[in-house]
Amino acid sequence: MATPHPVARAALAGLVLGMIGASLIFLYSAVGNFQRECGFPDTEECTFEMENAREIGRLQGFASIGCALLSGGLFLLWRKR
């Protein structure tokens, strides 16, 4: 098997590191959404805002897991070569 070009290896390394960085940013944002508080508790607007923040945080958590899995797969592909 031929060794890949150094530019291709550098591009793949950059992609892996970018996906890991995106995963960490999504995770940080998801945790921030789960800890959000509103100014007027016990109101309907506050309940709606909290439900929306939790739902967005859950979706960001899924995106974080997806980016981490993709970067892990790319890393394995990179190490295989």
Image: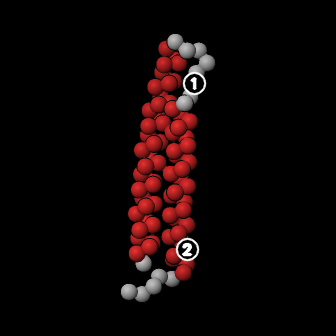
**31 w.r.t. 76: above or below:** above
Kindly state the secondary structure of the residue where label 1 is placed. loop
Mark 1: give few (<14), some (14-19) or many (20+) Cα within 10 Å: few
Q: Are marks 2 and 1 in contact (CB under 8 Å)?
A: no
Which residue appears at 44% of the width and 37% of the height?
Answer: 58
**44 w.r.t. 65: above or below:** above
Amino acid marked by disc 1: Glu
Q: Nearer the viewer, residue 80 or 60?
A: 80
Residue farthest toward the right in the current orientation of the protein = 39
Which residue appears at 48% of the width and 36% of the height?
Answer: 57
Q: Which mark is residue 10?
A: 2
The residue that mark 1 highlights is 37
* x then y, percent, for residue 4: 47, 82
Q: Quadrant of the N terminus?
A: bottom left
Mark 2: give few (<14), some (14-19) or many (20+) Cα within 10 Å: few
* x then y, percent, for residue 44: 49, 14
Q: Which mark is residue 65?
A: none
Display coloring: secondary structure
* x then y, percent, for residue 47: 48, 19
Residue farthest toward the top in the current orientation of the protein = 42
